[in-house]
Image (cartoon, grey):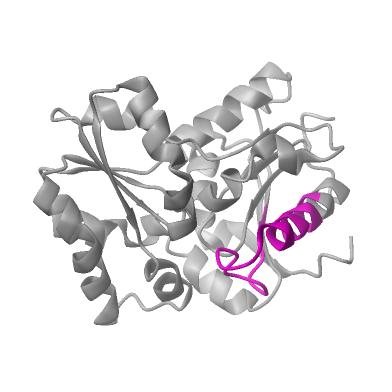
Amino acid sequence: MRKDAPIGVLDSGVGGLSVLKCLHQLLPHEDFIYVGDTARTPYGTRPEQEIRKFVAEIIDWLAAQGVKEVVIACNTLTMLGVESLKGAHQFPIVGMSKGEQLLLAASKKKKIGVFATPFTISTEAHKKAILAADPGAEVYPVGCAKFVPLIEGEQFESKELPEAIREYAAPLKEAGVDALILSCTHYPFIKEQITAEFGPEVTIIDPAEATSQLAMEALQAEGLAKTEGEGKVTICGTADIERVQRLAQRMLPIETCQFREINLQEK
């Protein structure tokens, strides 16, 4: 693998653009190819074997583009097990950080909230990671089923969005949490509204920053980090690329990005 090869980033939809934003900021010399499977999103309600098939198709497509690393920019897909998604590919694959150390550092009361998809919450992965790091912590997980459809549907000004935020925030406010992790890559799109609902006494953590650090460390360990030149960003969707472009401008300077609608069967 070459240092000047691109880094692949994948998600079932547009949520992973929040991770791409952090990756691009941390690794400005790197080229990125982002794939959002917008034709088949959301994945969360599909059978696991079907999800695995879709992810394998995306990774194979990225491999055909010559990537040197793949970042799984989705908590739900990370829960499937990063190594089990790798197949026969030789490049490193990095999944989403659970952010337990960031949360424990931010929480003085050790009362921690987790916003995630119902599937991610059902795995209890974040709760287990936090309690493994500090058995005295109290963890309050909330499955936020309404967020992803609202974000993918660009319903940022709808009355349904603040209603959903209030609904999911209520039990955490009652419990007195002082740190909250947004454990779905879609949720940073509404971080400002979530922060306003909780107020300044609650620290909101985006695990994309820790994930980007893991991606950089994996490149350095393989001697593949690019240290000069201006990186390029290509954002691909399997459908509805105009909507992808509209949502991308909430995260990235799109004037420096290229957009492509792709067919995963055409490598």
Does 100 sit left or right of 106 as displayed?
right
The residue at 45%/51% (across/down) is 122
Quadrant in which the C terminus is drawn: bottom right
Against 166, residue 188 (above or below) is: above
Q: Residue 107 falls in which quadrant of the image? A: top left
Image point 44% across, 36% down: which residue?
A: 98
Query: In front: 137, or 204?
Result: 137
Q: Residue at x 69, y 59 (%)?
A: 51
Question: Toward the viewer: 53 or 30?
Answer: 53
Image side of residue 35 versus residue 112, left or right: right
Which quadrant holds the N terminus? top right
Q: Is residue 142 above or below residue 104?
A: below
Which segment did they paint magenta? 34-59
One can see residue 199 in this view: no
Is residue 112 visible from the viewing direction of this image? Answer: yes
Nearer to the camera, 39 or 142: 142
Q: Residue 76, how many percent across, how many down?
A: 54, 52
Side (left or right) of 205 relative to 79 = left
Number of labels in the image equals 0
Q: Is residue 14 above or below residue 162?
A: above
Query: How far across and how far down the image is residue 86, in percent?
Result: 77, 39
Q: Is residue 209 left or right of residue 226?
A: left
**Residue 248 lies in the magenta-colored region:** no
Q: What residue is drawn where x is 55% and y is 77%? A: 243
Image height check: is 205 above or below 128?
A: below
Residue 110 % position (x, y): 19, 30
- Residue 58 colored in magenta in the image: yes
Spot occupied by residue 85 in the image (x, y as percentages of width and height)? 73, 43
